[in-house]
Image (cartoon, rainbow, N blue to C red):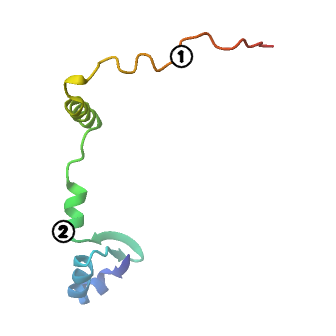
Amino acid sequence: MTQASIAEAKNNFPRLVQQAEAGEQVSITRRGHPVAVLLSTQAYERLIAPKPVLSEFLRTWREDMRTAAGASADEDVFTNLRDNAAGRAAELE
């Protein structure tokens, strides 16, 4: 990430914009402390894009899995996967 003071950014703004367009983030500093970031429109759009909610993703995924399984989908397909036999004897001290 390129860093530039406010004065440097003012004097070299076209070059900094070109760097941002190329995908590089440019940090603008005041007295050595970052105060702003110059980035491409593509990167900005990615930052502000709505994020999918987990519950919505899971609902959609379940529907897709049911659709992909078709009419042969068995609701209790996982019923017999676990061994229900008693486990081994354990001595607790």
Q: Residue 30 lies in what quarter of the image?
A: bottom left
Along the line of sight, the residue nearer the viewer: 81 or 21: 81
Please rate how many residues cluster around mark 1, counting C-alpha atoms within 10 Å: few if below 14, some from 14 to 19, many from 20.
few
Q: Which residue is mark 2?
A: 41
Q: Residue at x 19, y 31 (%)?
A: 67
- Amino acid type assigned to the residue bearing label 2 in the image: Thr
Q: Residue 70 lies in what quarter of the image?
A: top left
Report x, y in % for residue 29.
36, 75
Quadrant into which the N terminus falls = bottom left
Along the line of sight, the residue nearer the viewer: 46 or 64: 64
Which one is in front in this view, the residue at disc 2 or the one at disc 1?
1
Report x, y in % for residue 50.
20, 48
Quadrant into which the C terminus falls = top right
Please rate how many residues cluster around mark 2, counting C-alpha atoms within 10 Å: few if below 14, some from 14 to 19, many from 20.
few
Along the line of sight, the residue nearer the viewer: 42 or 67: 67
Q: Residue at x 22, y 85 (%)?
A: 13
Q: Regarding mark 2 in the picture, which secondary structure is present there?
A: helix
Q: Which residue is mark 1?
A: 83
Q: Residue at x 19, y 61 (%)?
A: 45
User: Is 32 on the left or on the right of 19, as rendered?
Assistant: right
- Amino acid type assigned to the residue bearing label 1 in the image: Asp
Name the residue at the right extreme. 93
Spatial separation of the CA atoms under disc 2 and disc 1: 55 Å
